[in-house]
Amino acid sequence: MNRKFSIQALFRVIFLILITLIYMAPFFWMISTSLKPNYELYEFPPKLIPSIAEFNNYSKALQRFPFFTYFRNSLIIAGGAVLGALISCPLIAYGLSVLKWKGREIVFYAILATIMLPNAVTLIPTFLIFSKLNMVNTFWPLILPSFFGHPFYIFLIRQFFLTLPRDLFEAAKIDGASEFQTYFKIALPLIKPTLVIVGLFQFIASWNDYLGPLIYLTDEKKYPLALGLPQFLDRYGTLWNQMMAAATIAVVPTLIFFIFAQRHLLESIKFTGLKG
């Protein structure tokens, strides 16, 4: 029995290692290419580890195009979208889980049904709205929608609210707390892990968004990194090492955010799966 269990555990570990290597391969290849000298870029068979680490590829990449302008624009867009999601989604989820009112379930499932709508369906109407509001070629079309909630984040936070005992909210109201005081002082601190995960998901989505900036931004000075990096490729297409160096730096904020949020990610998955 123990021998059978050990063989299964061994195969499970080998399988997980293989899956990890497959997923990590593009990341290692990006870093390896960013450190290669020019004469090793097109060698066959390609080398995973460069013979000489050319760290100055990073400084050259930053000097060749306005990296820090794109980086600042990405931070503004991603930061604004995260702020909007963290303000709107918990408030809507609280109203759909803790408060009792007629038609609550119908409204919730109507919001949930919008997840199935492909982005292409809402693309033209949304663009026309922002065009009428004279917001095209500004950051607002990329930030403002997050202040009106996102169905997946609302669903995620609602599931967490449903795991909380009702007695907590009843006790706060008996002590004289208003509904907003109960929300801010009781509910929000308890869903901190889920809020961190919502912030992480929204940050990654906004940081890597390519289609949105491509549609709404026409001024190159307002491009985020997702749109600015392909400009580097268009102008200096043969300099793959410097292109990969710029891409590696662009990934760093997402990695830092993910490392910070990984503990909360496990807690959030654990609690949101308890009650449906």
Image (tube, rainbow, N blue to C red):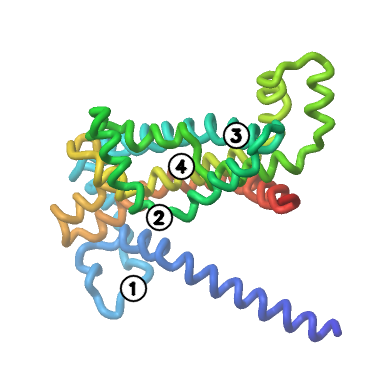
Relative to 24, 217 lies left or right = left
Q: Secondary structure at mark 3?
A: helix
Q: Nearer the viewer, mark 2 or mark 1?
A: 2
Which mark, by number, is residue 243?
none
Q: Nearer the viewer, mark 3 or mark 1?
A: 3
Q: Amino acid at mark 1?
A: Lys
In the rendered image of this protein, does residue 261 appear above or below residue 233?
above
Q: Secondary structure at mark 4?
A: helix
Q: Which residue is mark 1?
A: 47
Q: Secondary structure at mark 1?
A: loop
Closer-to-camera residue (116/191): 116
Closer-to-camera residue (23/172): 172
Alpha carbon separation for disc pair 1 and 4: 34 Å
Disc on the earlier residue, 3 or 1: 1
Disc on the earlier residue, 1 or 4: 1
Q: Which residue is mark 3?
A: 90
Q: Looking at the picture, how far across and down is residue 16, in whole percent?
A: 60, 72
User: What is the count of numbered marks?
Assistant: 4
Q: Is residue 260 visible?
A: no
Q: Nearer the viewer, mark 4 or mark 2?
A: 2
Q: Amino acid at mark 2?
A: Pro
Relative to 130, 274 lies left or right = right
Q: Which residue is mark 2?
A: 118
In the rendered image of this protein, does residue 35 appear above or below residue 44?
above
Question: Dot 1: within a 10 Å radius of its alpha carbon, few (fewer than 14), some, or many (20 or more) residues?
Answer: some
Alpha carbon separation for disc pair 3 and 1: 49 Å
Q: Residue at x 23, y 60 (%)?
A: 240
Q: Amino acid at mark 4?
A: Phe
Q: Which residue is mark 4?
A: 203
Closer-to-camera residue (49/228): 228
